[in-house]
Image (tube, coloured by chain):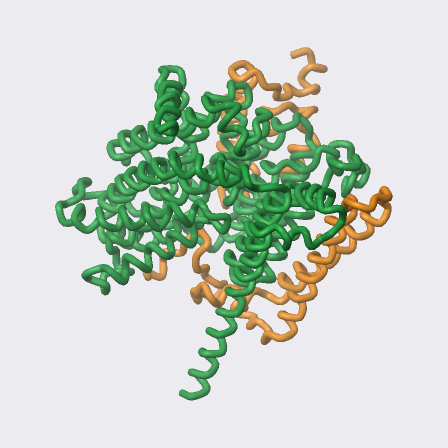
Amino acid sequence: MDTIFALLDGFAVALTPYHLMWALLGVTLGTAIGALPGIGTPLTVALLLPVTYNLDPTSAFIMFAGIYYGSQYGGSTASILLNTPGEAGAMMTAIEGHAMAKRGRGAQALATAAIGSFVAGTLGTIALTFVAPTMVKVALLFGPAEYFALLVLALTTVSAIMGGSLVKGLASLFLGLTLGAVGLDPQTGQARLTFGLQELLDGIDTIIVAVGLFAVGEALYVGARSKYAKDEIVAVKGSIWMSKSDWARSWRPWLRGALIGFPIGSMPAGGAEIPTILSYATERRLARNQAEFGQGAIEGVAGPEAANNASAAGVLAPLLALGLPTSSTAAILLVAFQQYGIQPGPLLFDTRPDLVWGLIASLYVGNVLLLVLNLPLVGLWVRLLSVPRDWLYAGILVLATLGAYTLNGNTVDVVILWVIGLMGFAMRMLDVPVAPCILGLILGPMAEDHLRRAMSIGQGNPLIFLEHPISAALLLLSAALAVTPVILRRRKAAAVRRATAES
Amino acid sequence: MPDKAVKWGPSPDKTANGRTLGRAEMVINRPLAWNAGFAVALLIAAGIVALDTMRLRVPFSYDSIGPTFLPYFVAIGLGCCGSAWLVNILMRRRPDASDVVAIDRSPILIISLGLIIQFTLIDTLGWIVVAGIQFALVSRAFQSARYLRDLLVGLAMGAVIFVAFNFGLGLNLPAGTLFRSLGL
């Protein structure tokens, strides 16, 4: 009951004309930039951060909420019409969505994606409304040992599940941890890995790394391939409304997608790959006409899009309730919070309920605004997609360096941006996943802090992590989740070897 | 899938001789140099982290972990990943030369040049000029041939951002000491 009242208070905050204006600006900018090919949600949020530097926290977060959901919508437009997902969560949509577009059914794909995102986003936000306070209650049982174990779980699962191999995931993770270690040690004040540079004493900013990896690295990669690869955009033609059978085929995948997306999104393993892949596989198995998959089955767009949006809502649960980011976007949102001196976590619900509930309420508002915006304005977003590629990336890089430079007003950040960009390019060439790096960067120092505090409390005895039941359980789970994909891959490879040997 | 539709995203790429790589092939068939280079870079990073950490003084304390724990842990981690990667390379077959994903080196150099100009000359030339130059250079990296047009668009974009940020949002983008000394 308290939750409902708190949410109503939040609506009182979110529905003022001033905040509505920022919400509208957020969803519009988020959709526009998210629609640009190659720009995923984390990069959209990172690039739009400078716009919010001088705003008051509430307006800034309302705008972020709009940008967050808006860029999900925009990303699905790029996936469907241009086959350039830009991020993991949009990849499944691209498969069926682009196939539909090539058959002349692009508008229906966009419509089912938009409506499914609205349905799942709303359901996900409702779930968030009730899950977040519950998580807060659980979090109050957490001490440093438990937080440390939770962070270990988050980091190991991200490294093990994403990407092609454990070695690559871990390499990315350790690179992120290295970047996170740069700066002054919080407990003893000694400078680590700063190599005499004064500007590094504060550490390397997450935004720089995110923009460097996503924007600069991607620009370098696509640029290097630009002589050989040409893009192809499919025009939206014919009727733009969904037929009755489209609706009939879509509504169950929407609900199933939401059901799959939210719980997985809210778990530390997180990420949008798993829920969307699961949703795709589920829809394929349950579909009446399985052969249509791969040629443009509308269920294959409805389900994954819903799963993607619901998991986006789910990711906000541990972020707001525990201060634990479980995706690259969440990490950037966390940085945005911290720039206002606000630390999300259990205390935030007590000390700044207006901020938290205003944010959650504006997620609902944002969802409605997006539905209203997106269906009629499809033509406008489509025109955005035909921005010539050279100007697109030129603009991205200018915005990227703007973000890097205005962060602290010095040029060292731009140098770091370039170096990280080169690293990102190498990672892109080698299929090394990027998310573990970003999460290592931001969660590493947090984990170190909790580790040291737990050890102080435990008086130097490392067994304290196993003596606390929650922490022991989480650590065992991490070990299991880290090892399982490796075992499964080995088994699959052995089975393939046996099959080819017998044939 | 039509042959003409090559996508620029994290999905199958075309190789230099026109064959499309499947997703699974991309992991194994990357050129040897890239893999080995990255693995060696990991090992070098491990070494640098370890060396830098050795000069830290650890305050004596019974109870807590000092500032050197994380860096050493990270150095060991980087070293293990680099070594495991090298072992993987040695155990797999050599990549076929025709499976190399073709990349052109000059866009990388051109884009890097744009960034270098940004961080060396931004205070001298100011934001607008530097943004314009960078815009033009990146466009060139993406095969654009109309340099003057790109430069003008870039200058316009830089100017819009300059005005919006300095006067609208109250942030401080440099106007360029060169122009100040010329009395503008």
Q: Nearer the viewer, residue A171 or A2?
A: A2
Q: Image point 76% across, 37% down: which residue?
A: A187
Residue located farthest toward the left when viewing the structure as drawn: A244
Vertical order, B167 against A401 (above or below): above
Looking at the image, how many numbered discs can be counted on the residues?
Answer: 0
Q: Nearer the viewer, residue A112 or A309?
A: A309
Q: Give the quadrant of the N terminus of chain A.
A: top left
**Residue A282 x %, y %:** 30, 58
Q: Give the quadrant of the C terminus of chain A.
A: bottom left
Residue located farthest toward the bottom when viewing the structure as drawn: A502
Vertical order, B11 against A255 (above or below): below
Indicate the colour of chain B.
orange
Q: Image point 45% across, 61% down: which residue?
A: B14
Position of residue A80 in the picture relative to residue A162 (left or right)? left
Q: Nearer the viewer, residue A139 or B37?
A: A139
Vertical order, A249 against B182 (above or below): below
Q: Image point 43% across, 65% down: which residue?
A: B22
Which one of the lettered chains is coloured green? A
Position of residue A411 in the picture relative to residue A311 (left or right)? right
**Residue A215 x %, y %:** 53, 41
**Residue A161 x %, y %:** 50, 58
Position of residue A265 in the picture relative to residue A235 (left or right)? right
Q: Is residue A198 visible?
A: yes
Q: Nearer the viewer, residue A138 or B161?
A: A138
**Residue A175 x %, y %:** 65, 50
Q: Image point 58% across, 47% down: which residue?
A: A151
Q: Is residue A427 visible?
A: no
Give the image quarter of residue A316: top left
